[in-house]
Image (cartoon, rainbow, N blue to C red):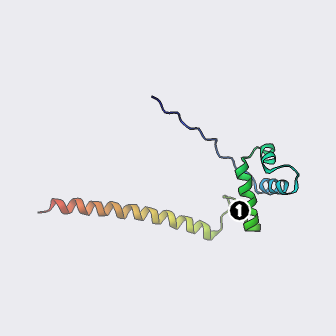
Amino acid sequence: MAEEAHEYPEPRFYSREFKLEAVRLSEASEKTVAQIARDLGVPERVLYRWRHELREQQEQAFPGKGHQSELEEENRRLKRELDLLKQEREILKKAVVIFSRSQP
């Protein structure tokens, strides 16, 4: 019996301006959030998340992924390096166990 593959739509990326306008519409319009989300072609839960983010973060909401500060970029680089070092350490631990077994 073949399993059905669940196909998820490819993620879409929206500009900060689009998100701000969508939130403004959802708060100022007499339409429901569901209707506005349908009109804009975004999932309702996404529009609710945007509203929440804007309420919580104000000016820092929707920063985007393309322009990271130097600190954010360094943090990302260091996390990648840490993950690599952890993997290398695990490999070395396993190698020590294997080589210690073969010695009399």
Q: Quadrant of the C terminus?
A: bottom left
Q: Quadrant of the N terminus?
A: top left
Q: Give me the residue at 88% from left, 51% from top.
A: 30
| Most foreground residue, 48 or 78 | 48
In the image, what residue occupies the spot 24% across and 62% down? 97
The image shows residue 53, relative to residue 43, as above or below, that is below
Mark count: 1
- The percent position of residue 28, horizontal first and vertical second, equals 87, 56
Q: Is residue 26 above or below residue 39?
A: below
Left or right of residue 5: residue 92: left
Category of crowding for the residue at label 1, using alpha-carbon neighbours closer than 10 angstroms: few (below 14), some (14–19), many (at least 20): few
Q: Amino acid at mark 1?
A: Pro
Tell which residue pokes out farthest to the top in this image.
1
Q: Secondary structure at mark 1?
A: loop
**Residue most extreme to the bottom:** 71
Q: Position of residue 91 (x, y in %)?
A: 33, 60
The residue positioned 75% from the left and 63% from the top of the image is: 54
- Reading the image, the residue beneath label 1 is 63
Drawn side of residue 4 relative to residue 49, left or right: left
What residue is drawn where x is 47% and y is 64%? 81
Q: Position of residue 94 (x, y in %)?
A: 29, 60
